[in-house]
């Protein structure tokens, strides 16, 4: 048996044997830590509640992370609770500290359980830590329930979408796999999993061609707009060449004409542009 296992057992044994604190003694220690930062008071307060840390950490051992790490993170939460605890309130320190201990352990699990970070919202955390329990509870009946129906019930209970439940279930059902791992379970295999990933981005020559075509079309359009009047150019720019085109009504108010007149000018300008483009580039009718 390794020395780390022995020291871990000794730590747990010592924590479980630490004396409980009476309410008045607990309040006195908390006030000494809050008011004068008495380190001895903090140590006694924390040591007497390490059994609480161990009990909470043990509830999360099925996530496959070292128990010693869970306890250590729970201890961080315990110290955070001690820093924020208000002894003047009629609340026992253990009641207040429980939330901080659990939150610290859960944050550690979310950071380290998988190399792929999941959602960090409160609903996503609730889904991550309750999905297995809820699924097991719904599957206890004699008649099997389809996955989709289970997902729907869990989604309602947690307050997320059915798709979120399905994605989280898939994450919890399989371990992380390295892209550098062999694609086949044979010694002769020489290909990694990453070799079979499909890159859906355009090829470099296609990207260059698209840029050249785009620049060429901009040049054609700029040259063709020479046949338009200043007002026609302005209307087309405001209506067609901006991300958020202006409305007929707003342009009419700016130019001092009706919105129907703006529509007529815009329509005529487009026809003039088409004619100019076809005249100069008859082989590019698909662009027009």
Image (spheres, rainbow, N blue to C red):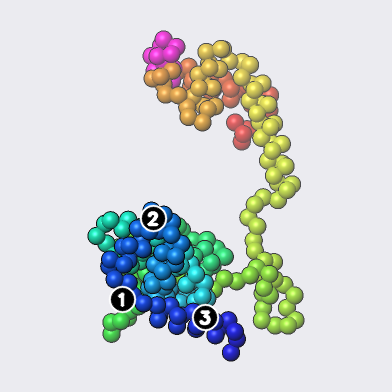
* Magenta run includes residue 259: yes
**Which residue occupies 27% across, 67% down?**
23
- The mark nearer the N terminus, 3 or 1, is 3
Q: CA distance from mark 2 to mark 1?
A: 46 Å
Circle number at residue 8: 3
Residue 72 appears in the picture as rendered: yes
**Which residue occupies 72% across, 72% down?**
191
Report crowding for label 3: few under 14, some 14 to 19, many 20 or more residues within 10 A (C-alpha). some
| Residue hosting label 2 | 34
**Which residue occupies 48% across, 29% down?**
244
Residue farthest top in this picture: 256
Q: CA distance from mark 3 to mark 1?
A: 37 Å
Residue farthest left in this picture: 90
Question: x and y percent of residue 108 in the render?
Answer: 49, 65
The front one of 155 and 189 is 155
Report the span colored magenta. Answer: 252-263
Residue 251: name its quadrant.
top left
């Amino acid at each position: 048996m390794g020395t780390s296992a022995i020291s871990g057992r000794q730590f747990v044994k010592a924590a479980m044997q630490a004396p409980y604190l009476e309410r008045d003694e607990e309040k006195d220690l908390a006030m000494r830590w809050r008011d004068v930062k008495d380190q001895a008071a903090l140590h006694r307060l924390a040591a007497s509640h390490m059994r609480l840390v161990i009990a909470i950490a043990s509830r999360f051992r099925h996530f496959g992370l070292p128990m010693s790490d869970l306890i250590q993170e729970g201890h961080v939460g315990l110290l955070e609770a001690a820093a924020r605890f208000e002894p003047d309130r009629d609340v026992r320190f253990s009641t207040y500290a429980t939330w901080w201990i659990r939150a610290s352990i859960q944050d550690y699990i979310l950071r380290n359980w998988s190399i792929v970070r999941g959602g960090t919202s409160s609903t996503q955390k609730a889904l991550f830590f309750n999905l297995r329990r809820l699924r097991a509870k719904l599957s206890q009946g004699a008649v099997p329930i389809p996955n989709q129906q289970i997902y729907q019930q869990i989604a309602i209970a947690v307050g997320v979408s059915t798709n979120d439940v399905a994605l989280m279930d898939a994450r919890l059902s399989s371990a992380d796999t390295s892209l550098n791992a062999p694609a086949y379970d044979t010694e002769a295999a020489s290909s990694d999993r990453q070799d079979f990933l499909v890159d859906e981005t355009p090829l470099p020559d296609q990207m260059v061609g698209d840029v050249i075509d785009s620049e060429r079309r901009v040049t054609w359009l700029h040259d063709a707009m020479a046949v338009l009047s200043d007002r026609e150019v302005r209307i087309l720019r405001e209506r067609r060449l901006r991300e958020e085109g202006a409305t007929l009504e707003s342009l009419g108010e700016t130019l001092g004409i009706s919105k129907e007149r703006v529509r007529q000018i815009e329509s005529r300008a487009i026809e003039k542009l088409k004619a100019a483009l076809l005249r100069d580039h008859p082989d590019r009718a698909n662009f027009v």
